Image (cartoon, coloured by chain):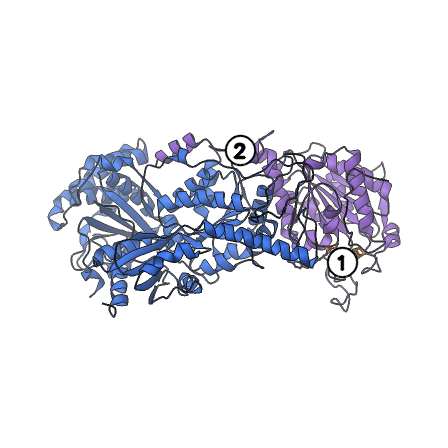
């Protein structure tokens, strides 16, 4: 079977738009996403772009559906090329029924030729081509144009020409309507009103805000910079100290200084920057100073593919930093989890005095989907700081290993935090008994932390588990829907480290375990193996994309064919 | 004589006769005389012999990694501007491993006192060259003597428009105390580079050598004259000691510029959840 033949859910339409950086695809995406949502569809969009500010060939995929949808597909229903390069670039994703639109100036083959550039020029500016296309698309699909016009009005605030262009494009589209064989997904205009549309970056940012983040120091690095930008913008609304540091070494050290004095601080980075933070991560471990790190992965090694996606840094997150010390690694899979785990990262870091690593990736950060209303009042604002008395000991040897954390200037105690091995009051020591006590204290903290491990989500009743973690959830879920095989179930992890026996016990219910990871080393499967989980098969990919649901459908089918 | 900042039950790890003892005493006396409150002071240090100083002072301290005192101190001051923050360590720590932070901390003009024990050698690792080692200085690593140009912290600080730039000699306690006090009272980033003999690994730059090769800037010197300060900072042998430069109209500090005057300490800053809700719903 080929990817075009994958039997897909018929209540959705996928639209791929391609062009060079700087042509305004992002504007088009934003206008269409808003307009489709207003029209009553579930909307999902994701982009794939080159590491350059101008030129090259980028695409944006928009999918509309009558059920929630959170995955890219390789094979598309409609393809719109803004330039000749894009037309070629997208060819492989078109099949015999794909409606291909291209400008009359470069279009060829089976493309439907339209006058994008000429029309835009007629209205006085080449950039109107985007609005023209939006109008045409609504015409072709025969969707009520008033929603598009509303969206355009909101986006261009008062620029009437854009509206005219859209109407003009719409009329062109209506004439081409007979070319479209698509059944429109059902609409639910009222039902969609309680949904919000955003990317993973924004949802993560809201999670960190809910977690009380009031300080962020970071060095820019794709694909993590979005959260840095988000929090900088939010510093206009809330009391948040944001600083661009001189390097990632400084970023995490500033974060530690912030927490030491009572802030809820975080940093944002990607693999290369995180590699520079290894030393400070270890300092967080030894000094028991909390830290929150937003680590948005991109493919490595080294500079790798700067604007693309991979789950290749799990080992880096789990093992970086010298010497053993407790840490937690959380890998949310959808917008709702970005918020919950953003909040949880701050809670865990504060409560246990550990580094909490929030592991995202380019795909999750940049893809836009829908999230239902969230009640922020339910995210309780806690602080785990104690007012100190004279004689306070920063590293008091407690039963659960967690020493009450004081901060300077709050109470009469003095706060001595130390990166050398230390005694309870925070004085350097080389006494081997004390060393053993402190090692044991930190280990006990880890035991407490492990008790909090959140079990994976399980969907379906089958005997064969398709296990994933982090950003692949939507793709796996859609692939399983496509396969519609009652023997399969989805098991998805967001709490990826440290793993606990109780958390993993659910895996004992399955006859076969297949692990899907967007990396080449199968790092999560290896973590499972450390806990004596037997893995029947692995599905790995490391081409810079997230899994496309239709391609993954075939991969899963292939991986189970000897079982059934 | 006892001092409020004496720390009980500590095992001081320095060699007898080391210049660090004088600096420890000096710092404690200045803190006491300026009536700085123990629990509102934080001393941050990296790693090295000099960086052990805060362990012997009874106050809040954060002993961090080699070279990293400055970014940690920055985070602390940003988090709570009411704290008096000191970053203290050796020349290797602050100018070598932490060189990049040195540059950018000055650019930020964060209100901290930056104390660098400059013994022109790596003490803790047993005698390799430091960034400030003089040319020709022979060590077990620099077997033919140092060939690199010595780092000039004062000139670098001035080139970055540091508001308070000074050097003192621990062999001249009375003068040293005046300058260090001034540094504490200055609002903004203040550099105090202290000439400190390492009696074990640096047999060249001794107490006598420092005294013979330096001179005190007298009253006729105008520390507010930036251009003159730049010139002075390039004088090497003899080295001028004292306040080379002090910005008369102290500039806005980093923490003020970031968070405004009298900003609430971040430990008491929580966000308005209803506002988060509203912003979320605008998506
Ligand atoms: C990352 C790292 N690299 C190297 C060291 C080893 N080390 C400790 S102190 C030091 C140099 C100390 O020299 P200086 O800062 O001048 O202080 P002194 O001991 O002379 O007072 C070195 C290289 C370390 N602790 N950490
Ligand atoms: S090695 Fe040098 S700097 Fe270190 S304590 Fe001994 S004399 Fe002082």
Q: Residue furthest front?
A: A399
The quarter of the picture where the C terminus of chain A appears is: bottom left
Q: Quadrant of residue A34?
A: top left
Above or below residue A529? Residue A35 is above
Q: Nearer the viewer, residue A110 or A444?
A: A444
The quarter of the picture where the N terminus of chain A appears is: bottom left
Mark 2 or mark 1, earlier in chain? 1
The image quadrant where one finds ligand 1 is bottom right
Of circles 2 and 1, which is in front?
2
Rendering coords of residue A201 (x, y %): 40, 45
The chain letter under disc 1 is: B
Q: Residue at x 28, y 33 (%)?
A: A153
Above or below residue A287? Residue A208 is above
Name the residue tied to disc 1.
B123
Disc sitting over residue B95 in the figure:
none
Name the residue tied to disc 2.
B269
Q: Nearer the viewer, residue A381 or B24?
A: A381
Residue A309 shows in this picture: no
Q: Residue at x 19, y 42 (%)?
A: A138
Chain with purple colouring = B
Using the rendered image, report if marks 2 and 1 lie on a common chain.
yes
B32 horizontally vs A151: left or right: right
Helix, strand or loop at mark 2? loop
Chain with blue colouring = A
Q: Residue furthest left?
A: A178
């Amino acid at each position: 079977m080929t990817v075009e033949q994958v039997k897909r859910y018929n209540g959705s339409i996928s639209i791929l738009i391609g062009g060079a950086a700087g042509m305004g695809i992002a504007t088009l995406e934003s206008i269409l996403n808003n307009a489709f949502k207003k029209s009553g569809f579930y909307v999902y969009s994701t982009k794939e772009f080159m590491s350059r500010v101008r030129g090259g060939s980028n695409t944006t995929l928009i999918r509309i559906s009558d059920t929630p949808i959170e995955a890219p597909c390789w094979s598309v229903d409609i393809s719109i090329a803004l330039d000749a390069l894009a037309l070629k670039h997208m060819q492989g994703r078109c099949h015999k029924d794909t409606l291909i639109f291209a400008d009359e100036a470069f279009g060829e083959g089976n493309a439907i030729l339209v006058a994008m550039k000429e029309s835009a020029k007629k209205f006085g500016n080449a950039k109107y081509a985007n609005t023209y296309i939006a109008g045409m698309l609504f015409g072709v699909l025969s969707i009520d144009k008033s929603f598009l016009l509303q969206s355009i009005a909101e986006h261009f605030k008062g620029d009437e020409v854009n509206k005219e262009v859209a109407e003009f494009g719409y009329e062109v589209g209506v004439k081409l309507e007979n070319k479209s064989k698509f059944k429109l997904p059902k609409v639910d205009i009222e039902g969609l009103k309680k949904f919000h549309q955003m990317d993973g970056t924004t949802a993560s940012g809201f999670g960190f805000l809910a977690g009380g983040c009031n300080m962020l120091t970071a060095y820019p690095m794709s694909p993590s910079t979005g959260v840095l930008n988000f929090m900088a913008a939010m510093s206009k609304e809330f009391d948040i100290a944001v600083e661009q540091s001189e390097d990632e070494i400084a970023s995490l050290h500033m974060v530690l200084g912030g927490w030491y004095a009572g802030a809820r601080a975080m940093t944002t980075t990607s693999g290369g920057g995180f590699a520079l933070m290894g030393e400070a991560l270890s300092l967080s471990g030894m000094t028991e100073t909390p830290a929150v790190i937003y680590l948005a992965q991109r493919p490595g090694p080294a500079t790798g593919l700067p604007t693309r996606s991979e789950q290749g840094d799990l080992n880096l997150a789990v093992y970086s930093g010298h010497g053993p010390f407790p840490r937690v690694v959380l890998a949310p899979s959808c917008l709702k989890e970005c918020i919950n785990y953003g909040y949880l990262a701050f809670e865990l870091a504060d409560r246990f005095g550990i580094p909490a690593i929030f592991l995202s990736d380019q795909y999750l950060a940049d893809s836009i989907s829908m999230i239902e209303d969230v009640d922020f009042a339910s995210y309780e604002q806690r602080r785990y700081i104690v007012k100190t008395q004279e004689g306070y000991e920063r590293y008091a040897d407690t039963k659960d290993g967690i020493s009450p954390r004081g901060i300077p200037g709050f109470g009469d105690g003095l706060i001595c935090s130390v990166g050398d091995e230390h005694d309870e009051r925070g004085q350097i020591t080389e006494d081997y008994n004390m060393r053993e006590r402190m090692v044991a204290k930190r280990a006990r903290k880890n035991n407490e932390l492990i008790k909090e491990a959140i079990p994976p989500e399980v969907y379906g009743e089958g005997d064969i588990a398709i296990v994933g973690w982090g950003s692949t959830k939507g793709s796996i879920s859609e692939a399983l829907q496509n396969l519609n095989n009652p023997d399969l179930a989805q098991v998805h992890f967001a709490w990826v480290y440290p793993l606990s026996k109780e958390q993993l016990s659910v895996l004992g219910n399955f006859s076969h375990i297949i692990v899907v990871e967007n990396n080449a080393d199968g790092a999560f499967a290896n973590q499972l193996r450390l806990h004596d989980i037997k893995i029947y098969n692995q599905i790995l990919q490391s081409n810079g994309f997230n899994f496309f649901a239709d391609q993954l459908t075939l991969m899963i089918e292939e991986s189970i064919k000897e079982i059934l | 004589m006892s001092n409020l900042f004496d720390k009980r039950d500590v095992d001081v790890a320095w060699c007898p006769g080391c210049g660090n003892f004088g600096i420890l005493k000096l710092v404690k006396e200045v803190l006491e005389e300026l009536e700085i409150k123990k629990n509102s002071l934080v001393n941050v240090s990296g790693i090295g012999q000099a960086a052990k100083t805060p362990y012997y002072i009874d106050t809040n301290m954060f002993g961090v990694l080699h070279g990293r005192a400055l970014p940690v101190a920055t985070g602390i001051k940003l988090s709570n501007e009411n704290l008096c923050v000191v970053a203290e360590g050796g020349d290797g720590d602050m100018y070598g491993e932490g060189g990049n932070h040195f540059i950018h901390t000055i650019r930020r003009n964060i209100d901290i006192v930056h104390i660098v024990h400059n013994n022109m050698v790596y003490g803790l690792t047993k005698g390799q060259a430091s960034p400030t080692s003089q040319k020709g200085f022979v060590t077990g690593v620099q077997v033919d003597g140092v060939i690199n140009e010595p780092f000039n912290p004062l000139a670098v600080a001035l080139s970055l428009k540091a508001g308070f730039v000074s050097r003192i000699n621990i062999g001249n306690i009375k003068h040293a105390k005046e300058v260090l006090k001034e540094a504490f009272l200055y609002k903004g980033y203040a550099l105090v580079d202290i000439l400190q003999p390492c009696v074990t690994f640096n047999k060249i730059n001794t107490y006598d050598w420092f005294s013979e090769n330096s001179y005190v800037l007298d009253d006729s010197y105008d520390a507010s004259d930036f251009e003159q300060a730049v010139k002075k900072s390039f004088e090497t042998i003899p080295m001028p000691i004292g306040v080379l430069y002090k910005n008369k109209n102290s500039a806005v500090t980093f923490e003020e510029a970031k968070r405004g005057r009298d900003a609430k300490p971040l430990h008491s800053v929580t966000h308005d959840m209803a506002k988060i809700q509203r912003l979320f719903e605008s998506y």
